[in-house]
Amino acid sequence: MVTPVNTSDRLKQLRELMSSNKYNIGAYVVPSEDAHQSEYVAACDERRPFISGFDGSAGCAVVTTDQASMFTDGRYFLQARQQMDDNWTLMKWGIAGVPSWQEYVTDHLPAGTRVGIDPTLITAEQGAKLREALQAKSGDLVAISENLVDVVWGSARPVRPEDPAFVLDVKYAGETHTAKIARVREQLERDNVRGLVVTALDELAWLFNLRGSDIDFNPVFFAYAVVTNDTVTLYMNEAKLTDAVRKHLDGILVQPYESIFGELSAMSVGLAESEGRLLVGKTASWALVEALGESNVKVDSSPIVLLKALKNATELAGMRKCHERDGAAMANYFGWLENELLHNGGNLKLSECDVADKLETLRREQDLCVGLSFSTISSVGANGAIIHYSPQRGSESLLDTSKMYLCDSGGQYLDGTTDVTRTYHFGEPTRWERECFTRVLKGHIALDMAVFPNGTSGFVLDPLARLPLWEIGLDFRHGTGHGVGSFLNVHEGPQGVGVRKHYADVGFRPGMTITNEPGYYQDGDFGIRIENTCVVVKTDTKFDYTNGNGYLTFEPVTMVPIQKKLILNELFTDRERQWLNAYHQTVWDRVSGRLDKSGLGYEWLKRETAPM
């Protein structure tokens, strides 16, 4: 049972600061993100979890003088409700009639309200829109450089990590950092801008072929960079610079991390005099754009976003190989787990945390494994319905052969990043569980088998994964797929499959990665998700209506069997059986040679990949 955090004293202190003469604000916004708009943040930047108790990866808190509201999406409705105390009201994004946090502060607060926010934690575009909307109602968006949650947190706030960065060998990156910088400069010249300010941490790691450990599960480091046509400056603290990193960065000026805002302010004078502009990505903070001056910047997508998304041949080869090794770890895991639950005296004292730890141990035994790509979602029964559930010692559930088990996990390898979800039942599933599983699998297969013109968006393809559920009035409240980094963040854009508007603006191209992960979640009972990581590849068609643009499809690189016992045969077509048998044959061919033939994993894989 999850015990909510008592936030009464924290909110009291925050409200005292808000109402003080120094700030005099009627509302304070606490976003999830850090100064780089990271989805996952370091412990020192977990301000929203600190003030609310809710630690899901997405959400925004708005605190007024008499209310505290938490806005989050369907992945986290159950989790937020469990983790927050009675001081908080859950605002369910995406439900009809529920405003977004932006709509709430502009349309639902009294006219004239001054709304405070840390300007490093909101994008320049969001800041401008909010300020305009609030000022139209005699209010204002107030930039408060001293983060008020940090003040409440005080000395208990974790320190910012300063672990050294390290060089990612070109044999894994596939391209030198100097070649990448040259490609960025070519794009800047086409865009007619003087340079680029790089703020996203995964873009920095990709551009410089460096990796770090500043954020759990994400091999990134805190830094900024400015790339012009003749200079490159990396803003990164001295503690991160090993001799190898210094040598690697030869010719690149390195300045302290905290000096970026002062340097940009100084740079703004020269830009104004020459009428030049710097390109900043859409995730650049309001504070950063203010430092440069709005007239000196062009806010648009960073060219690195797409360059990073289009994997080179080396990265694609690494992605396939790391998934084979990951598949071996998963086979060993499920072989062990099944044996413990069914044959080794019926070990029913295994907890969700116990088995997650076992999976991590088996993963780390694989060549080139650096760690996990996110906290393992090891969930039994009703916990599986909490879409991003993370078991905690002391409150986790025990495994139960009468209940569904959902495991969403991934690894970070020097040659790639993995993300896989499988749902298994180690006893006798009900007919309803089998029907739900089968419909999720049918959607997964439909998306995997899709053939579509080059440039088709994930917004267009999303219904393929949902139709089998829609047929009986079911659905799932999360995206169907996201990009995956190459030894980088497990969630990567700009591509994705889902109903979010921005997915309609990005077309698939060969070399992109994407997950395929439809699901179904029955509150209080079970959760089902089937996830493969895929590569977007060219495919041949009998005709070509695109006049040479060509057609694409998905190649699954995840190599883990899908449980046949959960399939309701009467709902499964011959074509779907052929797909599953072919997929399982590929899994066997690519993974079995990596397993000990006398081990539990080998026997499990052999049985689970046998044809239907």
Image: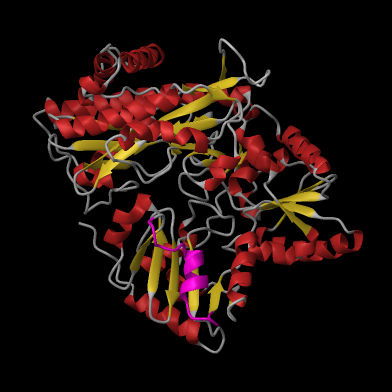
Quadrant in which residue 81 is drawn: bottom left
Determine the residue located farthest toward the bottom in the rendered image. Answer: 21
Whether residue 565 can be seen here: yes
Residue under the point 75% across and 32% down: 179
Q: Which residues are magenta?
A: 95-113
Above or below, 346 against 243 in this view is above
501 and 406: which is toward the camera: 501
Q: Is residue 391 above or below residue 143?
A: above
Q: Please state which of residues 476 and 167 is positioned toward the viewer in this rendering.
A: 476
Q: Position of residue 133 (x, y in %)?
A: 59, 71
Tell me residue 122's x, y (percent): 58, 62
- 167 lies above or below 147: above
User: In percent of the image, x 17 and y 29: which residue is there?
Assistant: 426
On whether residue 255 falls in the magenta region, the answer is no
Q: Position of residue 547 (x, y in %)?
A: 68, 18
Quarter occupied by the C terminus: top left
Q: Quadrant of the N terminus?
A: bottom left
Coloring scheme of the render?
secondary structure
Estimate the x, y position of residue 326 in percent, counting from the top left: 40, 27
Would you say residue 420 is visible in this rendering? Answer: no
